[in-house]
Image (cartoon, rainbow, N blue to C red):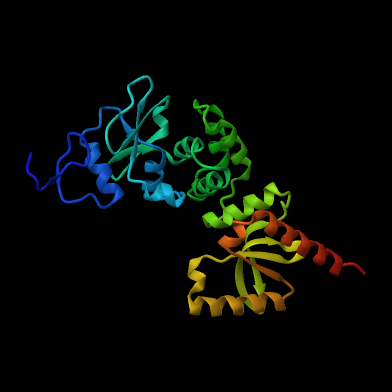
Amino acid sequence: MRSRDLQRPFHGVRRVGELGTLIERMESYSAVMVPGAFFCGPTAALLIGMPLPLALEEAPLLHVAVPWPDRAPRGAGVVGHKYMIDPSELTKLQGLVITTAARTWCDLAADLVLPDLVAAGDWVVRSGVPVDQIAALADRHPGQRGRRRRLEAVPLLDGRAESRKETHLRVLLIRAGLTAFVPNVEVVASGYRYRLDLAWAAKRIALEYQGGYHHDPTQWQRDMTRRSRLEAAGWTVVFVSSADLAAPDELVRRIRALIALRRDAKRP
């Protein structure tokens, strides 16, 4: 057990080779978890595929909890917690005990800013958990850290959202009072069916978030053709990038100006 070719990722754990993936780290640590312990927070979120900020995705620490009032786990590579938790808020995935998607989301409110929390919640709703179930759990959640943010996020959840950045854009617009934009609206233009990231159908304004894959030359050509067809059908299409989201006030001003122009265009 003291051989130099063995790795020591956690106290009491020895293994051959590095721990390259989240599941490998979780499986290794599960060998020394105390009875009743479970994975929670960012660790549970990443295992089930919930979208998180890059800093949390790349963090090497495992979040592990025990039921209150047991002593929270301690040790290198672990962030320990003790939670008041109902057994119904735990589940098993790939043989590992973790908090359910809804409970995980509630716990994340202590650490995520509102747009990221809503993006994670949109994923939970899209995975099949009803908003009213999430709302009930958020209301009775025993933790006070993040409570206000949880309750603020619940009315913003929308299972139609399909990407984290699209949600960030939607939350920005809602907080600016621009509540008419709806996620992933399907329209037909020039005989082609398209799904718009965010659309105000009455004014025919579409906001399309351009992620990194849109920089591919083939995808860029498709985007240009799509935009041309939509504009021929009377839509105004606005491409939004990460740089735009980094300057939210200026972006909102531009969108407001566009809305005013569309309103003026309809006057007799």
The quadrant holding residue 86 is top left
Number of disc labels: 0
Q: Nearer the viewer, residue 59 or 92?
A: 59
* Residue visible at 29% across and 45% down in the picture: 94
Q: Nearer the viewer, residue 245 or 95?
A: 245
Left of 78 or right of it: where is 257?
right
Q: Position of residue 223 (x, y in %)?
A: 57, 75
* Residue visible at 68% across and 47% down in the picture: 175
Q: Nearer the viewer, residue 177 or 47?
A: 177
The quarter of the image holding the N terminus is top left
Left of 197 or right of it: where is 123?
left
Picture layout, residue 218 above or below residue 20: below
Picture layout, residue 90 above or below residue 122: above
Q: Position of residue 101 (x, y in %)?
A: 44, 41
Query: Which residue lies most toward the right here?
Result: 268
Q: Position of residue 59 (x, y in %)?
A: 36, 46
The quadrant holding residue 64 is top left
Q: Nearer the viewer, residue 78 or 200?
A: 78
* Residue visible at 66% across and 72% down in the picture: 188
Query: Which residue lies most toward the top here?
Result: 69
The quarter of the image holding the C terminus is bottom right
* Residue visible at 50% across and 49% down in the picture: 123
Q: Position of residue 4 (x, y in %)?
A: 9, 45
Picture layout, residue 22 above or below residue 2: below
